[in-house]
Image (cartoon, helix red, strand yellow):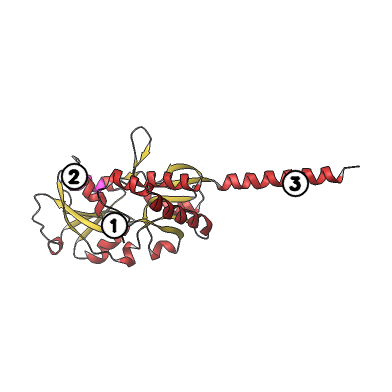
Amino acid sequence: MLNPTRLFAAASIAALSLFAGSAMAQDKIVIGTEGAYPPFNVLEADGKLTGFDIDIAKALCEQMKAECTFVTNDWDGIIPALQAKKFDAIVASMSITPERLEKVDFSEKYYNTPPAIAVPKDSPIKSVEDLKGKTIGAQGSTTHANYAEKHLADSELKLYPTADEYKLDITNGRIDGVIDDIVVLSQWVKSDAGACCKILTAMPVDEQINGKGAGIAVRKGDTALADKFSAAIKAIRANGKYKEINDKYFDFDVYGQ
């Protein structure tokens, strides 16, 4: 006959093991990013991921005591890949917009910067009004492309799979201007690669298009994970880790208002 005490003990150990296994599984998070959007996320030649998004994600994982791994995915398919459970969260400078909120849930923002326009240094374009009839480049499936469609409707919009490709075209004189995040363009025009160009102007934020800042996307209904990220964002803002990472890349606070 089985000893009831031993049977209960064995059942208790099995239950604890199952619980521990579930907790361990929850603490493992696979993060998707693009790897082609400097200075926020960059896949280096040696296969290493660098950038503000990556450093913030690592700090958040450390704060949450989670084991995180990273995978890269083309921007156009990054939300479908999340929905297909190829990863658990997206940390890739994704703006929190009404359109995206229909497909995914978000943490609170972790930064918020406005769009801007860059043009060649020798360009005759001196104002936004001068962009009428000109060709503007933007990365496809982004808030900046949507912004140009609405607010630069008198210009011809040319879409690119990545930011690197529109940068190549404006450098070679094939387009008249580009639109993107002001930080992305500012960092680029300060570099040797962006020596061709200058910032024409920052653009007013259209919250319906630009959203309320960049957040961490999770699958629809995964509010527990989104809340964990939100709490971790608040924590690293409070303990100084956010500022340490911010100051590594920028000379102003990109968190915004």
Q: Which residues are the magenta region?
A: 165-175
* Distance between mark 3 and mark 1 Cα atoms: 52 Å
* Distance between mark 1 and mark 2 Cα atoms: 18 Å
Residue receiving disc 3:
12
Image: 67 above or below 102: above
Measured as percent of width and height from the top left, residue 193 is found at 20, 41
Report the amino acid beneath label 1. Answer: Thr
Task: Single out the residue that lies furthest toward the top.
Answer: 46
Identify the residue at horizontal 10%, vertical 58% (top origin). 126
Q: At numbered mark 3, what does the secondary structure look like: helix, strand or loop?
A: helix
Identify the residue at horizontal 42%, vertical 47% (top origin). 57
CB-based contact (under 8 Å), mark 3 and mark 2: no
Answer with mark 3 or mark 1, whichever residue precedes in sequence: 3
In the visual, does 224 lie left or right of 192?
right
Answer with mark 3 or mark 2, whichever residue precedes in sequence: 3
Q: Is residue 169 magenta?
A: yes
Measured as percent of width and height from the top left, residue 166 is found at 24, 48
Image: 171 above or below 211: above
Report the amino acid beneath label 2. Answer: Lys
Residue receiving disc 2:
190
Residue receiving disc 1:
113
Identify the residue at horizontal 87%, vertical 43% (top origin). 3
Answer with mark 1 or mark 2, whichever residue precedes in sequence: 1
Measured as percent of width and height from the top left, residue 91 is found at 41, 50
